[in-house]
Image: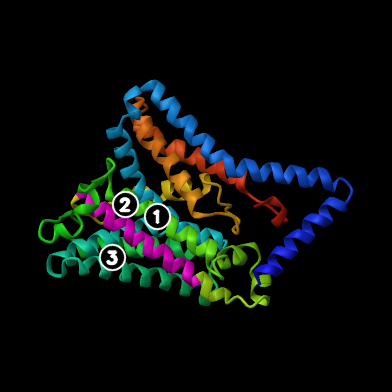
Amino acid sequence: MIAVATRTSTERTSAETRAPGGAAAAVSRTTRDRLRLAGPSVVLVALVLLVALAEPNFLSMNALAVVSAQAVPILLLGLGQMFVILTGGIDLSVAALASLATVILATAIGSLGPLAVVVTLVALTLIGALTGLLIVFGQVPSFVVSLGALGFWGAVALVASGSTTIYISEGYEAIFWLSSWTVLGLPMAVWAGVAAVAAVFCAMRFSPRGNVFHLVGLGEIAAMMSGVRTRAVRVGAFALSGFFAGAAGIVLSAQQQSAAPQLADSLLLPAIAAVLVGGCAITGGIGGAWRVLVGALVVTVLRVGGSVAGIDPSFQQIVYGVVVIVAVAVTLDRSRLSIIK
């Protein structure tokens, strides 16, 4: 299957090169691909330097620890979102699910202790899988179903929490290490996030079927004809999105020592922006874990660095909106779309 996909790509490139003007088009596409890969890293370095010029202390170890810690929930939500976007869909419910995860964790951790973490992750994975099943077997666009899931699970979190903040005291020792323990000056949550990125990268790179999400996003019909169970892959993408939303909720609870039905709601746009800014194509089939990591850092530097530089926080949503539009414009594969609407 992988050999077929590689051969098809090679044959397409060869045909494009032989066609009139094909060599120039192939060079242009190669240049564009290189810019897509290097662009996010260049933007990250430029942003850090600009903020450091405005506030030199931004490069101190304490400041970098704060930035990296705030990037973790966005990174985890972005990793989950990445799987869905790779298949050509989108999950608008991830932030609401992360908020629900904090409520589930805070409710269960007093009696279950560390087991509450497992319960939270399993529950959120099942919720994500349910969303995927509704999309696949109901034949309803992911935008519509996940938008409905956003409202539904947000309401469930409100009811379960009594529409109030739940402070975690009993059982907090099961998760406090994520924010309190440090290695090389960085909280354990940061290292856990990096470990998650490395695990996803290795699974996609070295597993025999690690590229199935890419294949479904590049061409679902072709993937199906190659023997890929495309429905299972799409459901799996939403299940993973739910899992990482649960992980993000656990990290948020550890950082805040509390839970709330809307604790992560403001992270929806930053999480999507992290995936797109990192170079993952909204049309599906292009992306990777390390790209999401760079994108999450870019978004977090915009959030934290803007405040450090004295930019009014009310302008952050404007910045995110512009960033998402620009990122989509840059990463959109127009050759796969006959009509843009």
**Other-residue count near label 3 (Cα within 10 Å), few / some / many at <14 / 14–19 / ≥20:** some
Q: Secondary structure at mark 2?
A: loop
Contact (Cβ within 8 Å) of mark 1 with mark 3:
no
Q: Position of residue 333 (x, y in %)?
A: 66, 51
Q: Which label sits on residue 264?
A: 2
Is residue 238 in sight in this rendering? yes
Q: Position of residue 213 (x, y in %)?
A: 55, 65
Extreme-right residue of the structure = 20
Kindly report the distance in space between the C-alpha atoms of the residues bearing marks 1 and 2. Answer: 10 Å
Q: Position of residue 218 (x, y in %)?
A: 64, 62
Q: Which residues are magenta?
A: 235-256
Kindly report the distance in space between the C-alpha atoms of the residues bearing marks 3 and 2. Answer: 14 Å
59 inside magenta stretch: no
Give the residue drawn at x 70%, y 41%: 31
Query: Compared with residue 317, is residue 306 higher up or lower down, i.e. above or below?
Result: above
Left or right, residue 67 beside residue 173: right
Foreground residue among 91 and 223 = 223
Q: Which residue is mark 3?
A: 156
Q: Which residue is mark 1?
A: 77
Is residue 89 in sight in this rendering? no
- Number of marks drawn: 3
Of pointers 1 and 2, the one earlier in the residue sequence: 1
Badge nearest the viewer, 1 or 3: 1
Left or right, residue 83 beside residue 122: right
Extreme-left residue of the structure = 170
Query: Compared with residue 100, is residue 57 higher up or lower down, i.e. above or below?
Result: above
Badge nearest the viewer, 3 or 2: 2
Kindly report the distance in space between the C-alpha atoms of the residues bearing marks 1 and 3. Answer: 20 Å
Q: Amino acid at mark 3?
A: Val
Q: Amino acid at mark 1?
A: Leu
Q: Position of residue 95 (x, y in %)?
A: 36, 55
Q: Amino acid at mark 2?
A: Ala
